[in-house]
Image: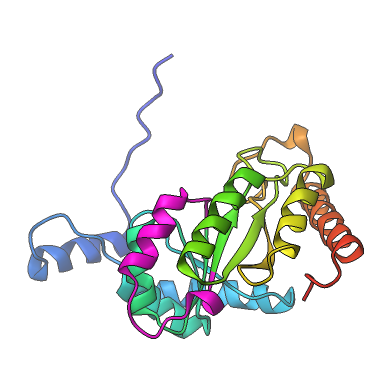
Amino acid sequence: MRPADRGGPYNDYFRVLNQELKAHGPMRPVMLIDLDRLDHNIDMVQQSVKRGGKQLRLVEKSLPSPELLAYIGQRAGTQRLMSFHQPFLNHDAQRFPEADILLGKPLPVRSAELFYQGHKGPFDPARQLQWLIDTPEHLQQYLALARGLGTRLRINIELDVGLHRGGVKDSLELGPLLTLIAANPQHLEFAGFMGYDPFVGMGVPGILGSPEALFAKVMQRYQSAVDFTRQRHPALWQ
C-alpha cells in the first residue's frame, strides 16, 4: 500500500530561483513571489471578472501582507477587501483608508466593540465597513452595540448557499433579520448578501453535480433572497 517514489529534480525555473536565493537570499525561510507570474494571474482573473460583469474583492485570509494586498489591488483596480479578524481589520482601516471592507465571518460582538475602540483615521465604518451577520440573536447584539456607540452599522447577511458552514437557510430565517434592520434605520443598514460557494476550490465530488449545475443552484439561492427582500422590504434594497 506504500506509494511508489515518483520524485525527481525540479525544473530549470525552480533551479534558477534556488540559485538566486543561495546567492542573494537572507539565508532563512522566506516566501518568494514571482511578480511576473503574479501579474499574469491577476490579469487572467480580471478578464474573467469583467466578462461576468462583477467586481473583485481581495480576501486576505489569516496571514495578510499589506504590501502584497496593495500591489494586487493596484494592478487589479480594486479597493475591496475581505477581512477575518479584528486586529487585521483595524490595520486594514488604517492602511487602506479608501477600502470597502466586508467581514468574511461573523465576529463576536466584543470583537466589533474592540474595533471601534481602537479605530482611528479617515476610514468611515458607517460607509465603508460591512459586518457579517448570521442569526437574529447576533444582530440584536450588534444593534445594542450601535445604540451604545451612537452610530449605524452596515449589515451583510450570510446565506447558506450549499456549504452548510453557517448562514441563513431560507426566507423563514431571513425574514426576522430584515425586519429588525428595517425597524432600526438609524442604527442598522442592509448592505447585501454573502455566501460560501461549495464548488469553488473545494474539490467537490462530481456525484454532487457539475460546477455549472452547482453554480446555478447557488445563484438560484441568491435570487430567492433578493426577490424576498424586494417583495417584503423594498425600502431596504439598493
Q: Nearer the viewer, residue 154 or 104?
A: 154
- Give the answer, above or below, for where 49 lies relative to 208: below
Give how far across and how far down residue 177 sits, in percent: 72, 52
- Give the answer, above or below, for where 96 lies relative to 139: below
Q: Which of 141 and 229 is in front in this view?
A: 141
Tell me the colour scheme of the image. Answer: rainbow
Query: Image quadrant of residue 1?
Result: top left
Give how far across and how far down residue 81 sits, in percent: 49, 70
Name the residue rendered at 29%, 60% in the picture: 14
Name the residue rendered at 35%, 29% in the picture: 5
Name the residue rendered at 70%, 45% in the picture: 160
Q: Give the range drawn in magenta.
A: 104-129
Give how far across and how far down residue 85 sits, in percent: 39, 55
- Give the answer, above or below, for where 9 lies relative to 150: above
Left or right, 41 with reference to 222: left
Q: Determine if the magenta segment contains residue 227.
A: no
Q: Nearer the viewer, residue 165 or 56?
A: 165
